[in-house]
Structure formats: structure tokens, C-alpha cells
Image (spheres, rainbow, N blue to C red):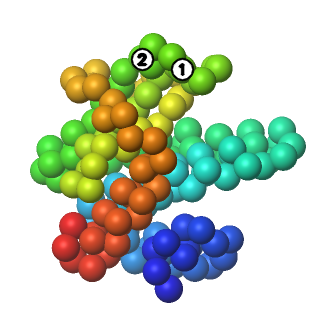
Amino acid sequence: MSIRNVFDGSDSDATRALYRQLEALGPRGVVAVQLLRAQKANERAKVYRGRRFTSAAYDKKAWAIGQLIEALEAHGVELAIGFGWREDPNPPPGYPWVLYCDLPTGQVSFHMATRGRGPDYPRDWDGQTGQAAPRIITWATEVLDGRG
């Protein structure tokens, strides 16, 4: 099953199996897992109806972002993945902070309610909307295939 199919689907066994496969590849795989988790939770939160499910998805996203930052602080330099925080001048309500990550497949970003650990981000947003999931999935696929 492709990473795209697992990402789009709701099969928890397939998702856990994919994450175990990626994590077994070391730091690059760990970063890929946390990016996939954060992005999937972010997308789910935007379509859920009902505060409980939406809140749970955003909590999962925040947890995954924390795990992502931990992995990037430990291995970002060796993986050549830059990251950092900037305040959005025109944020969505309640989400003024943006975590940016520079993947080989392009910049990805996550709006957050609060600023997390990590450096300030030195560059501007690339202006590309709707590209986080494709860029994360492409890179995770390259990691899994030994190309990323």
C-alpha cells in the first residue's frame, strides 16, 4: 500500500505498520513519521464536525509537532532539514505561530496556537498553498524507498 493511500485512509493497522517501517530507518524515518502524523491530524481537524473530535485532532497535531521538533533539534542538521518559527502577519483566528520545515521536496508549514521550542525561521513563506501533504508524502516515500 502506498503512503498516499495510508495517509488518505482510516486503517489504523496500516498506519501503524507504515510508521514502524519508517521509524526503523532511523532519524530520517522518525522525522517523516511526525510530519505525516501532524499533517494528517491537521487535515482531519479541519473536516471533523463536533468539538470533541476536532479538539482531539488538534491535540494530536500539537503532540506530533512536539515530537517533530525534538527529532529536528537532535538530527535536523545532519538531515539537512532546516526549521523554525515565525509569527504570521495574517493568521487564522487563534493560530498566530507557524512552524516551517525545509524538506528536500519543498517548504511545509503548520499554524499553531503557541510558539514551540526551536529557532526563529530565517526565510519567508514560499506562498504555495495546499502543498504540505504532497511534499510530505513525496519525501516520506523517498525515505521509505531509500532515496530521501
* Residue at the outermost bottom position: 1
The percent coordinates of residue 104 (x first, y second) are 21, 54
Helix, strand or loop at disc 1? loop
Compared across the picture, whether 20 is left or right of 92 comes to left
The percent coordinates of residue 67 (x first, y second) are 43, 46
Compared to residue 112, the image places residue 4 above or below, namely below
Number of the label disc, if any, that sits on residue 87: 2
42 or 92: nearer the viewer: 92
* Quadrant for the C terminus in the image: bottom left
The amino acid type of the residue labelled 2 equals Glu
What residue would you read off at disc 1? 91
Compared to residue 148, the image places residue 126 above or below, namely above
Compared across the picture, whether 141 is left or right of 2 comes to left
Compared to residue 48, the image places residue 12 above or below, namely below
Q: Residue at x 59, y 46 (%)?
A: 42
Say if mark 2 contacts mark 1, CB within 8 Å.
Answer: yes
78 or 47: nearer the viewer: 47
| Distance in Å between CA atoms under marks 2 and 1 | 8 Å
Q: Is residue 51 visible?
A: yes
Badge nearest the viewer, 2 or 1: 1
The amino acid type of the residue labelled 1 equals Pro
